[in-house]
Amino acid sequence: MNFTQLPNGMCDGFVVLRKCEEKKTKNGSTYLDLIIGDKDGEMSAKLWDYNGASGVFEQEMVVKIRGTVEEYQKKEQFRVSQIRPVNDNDNYNLADLVPSSDVGGEMLFDMMLQKVNAFTNDNLRRIVLEIVNDKKDLMVTFPAALKLHHAMLGGLMYHTMSIVRMAEEMCKIYPAINRELLLSGAILHDVAKTWELEESKTGLAKGYTKEGELIGHLVKGAMIVDETAKKLGIEGEEVTLLEHMIISHHGIPEFGSAVRPMFLEAIVLSMLDDLDATIYEVNTATDKVEAGSFTDRQWALDNRKLYNHGLGNTEHKVNF
């Protein structure tokens, strides 16, 4: 973890409380049982003789912490001597504390806008611009998932633009694909995740909203397209095509699609969405083991073990 070493042998830094539970020792005194973390890792921590004087703490809170790293049962454990919630005067970067996109969401959003502004299909251009400009503040920071692929700050824009870049290359190979329709679907396919997921204090998702559980981002995304088209007075077939691409992009009903993809661009979008998520999951899993080793079984990938052959580029950034 990224602590600053102090002359007195202690260390301090900013961390996220990934777990925070109030417990009792055998003699009845209260302590806080913590898991502290930053983007480099996490460790167990204890605040002994806790009486609430140092503040009230809860999971997902960002705090400044000071203490010593000790060994307990052959593992590192942080013994807290001082702890406090962060304030407006603290100089810390949330991206240093939680998983975050390597590329800024604002930059990716601007890249996306340039592509949409150049659309020749006026109906697609107006619908997409209206929706993304309305959702911009959330789109540039939101994660793309609760736990799986791109569950990081800015993950939604990273995932979206990864698919846009793959879609553009597909259109060069297969001229039968309508580029503007495919890009529109790629840009809007997950836009309702800004409504489906509940944001935590750290900017990551901590769960699903009630509406997200009951309706989901596929149906809500299609609803947003319908509402936007009516607002703009657009009645062309592009509205129906976009709605279909969104409600079918998970491919099969077992994965949440209302229908299976029924035209070329919808089929391509569904496959690219799955491909980008799979590549992210594979890279994340194999990064955790040495070359020549297998990962644990990955339940999100059919419970397969994955092999790190060590021949690939360790830089997994997308070339936007």
Image: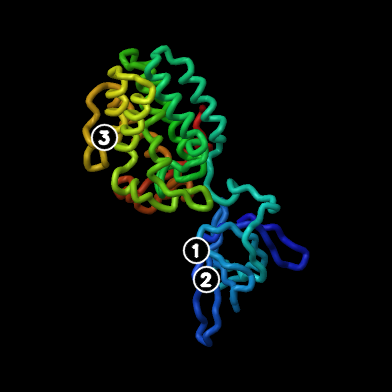
Q: Determine the residue positioned at 41% across, 49% down.
A: 147
In this rendering, is residue 66 above or below 222?
Answer: below
Q: CA distance from mark 2 to mark 1?
A: 8 Å
Rate crowding at label 3 as few (under 14), some (14 to 19) or many (20 or more) other CA atoms within 10 Å. many
Amino acid at dot 1:
Lys
Depth check: give the residue in front, 158 or 218: 218
Q: CA distance from mark 3 to mark 2?
A: 43 Å
What residue do we see at 59% from left, 48% from top?
94
Residue 165 appearing in the image:
no
Is residue 199 visible in the rendered image? The answer is: yes
**Tag 2–tag 1 contact (CB < 8 Å):** yes
The residue identified by callout 3 is: 251
| Residue named by callout 1 | 19
Q: Amino acid at mark 3?
A: Gly
> Mark 1 to mark 3: distance in Å?
36 Å
- Mark 3 lies on a secondary structure that is loop
Q: Earlier in the sequence, mark 2 or mark 1?
A: 1
Tag 2's secondary structure? Answer: strand
Residue at mark 2: 33
- Within-10-Å neighbours for mark 2: few <14, some 14–19, many 20+: some
Q: Residue at x 32, y 49 (%)?
A: 213
Q: Which sits in the foreground, 127 or 111? A: 127
**Could you say which is closer to the camera, residue 33 or residue 316?**
33
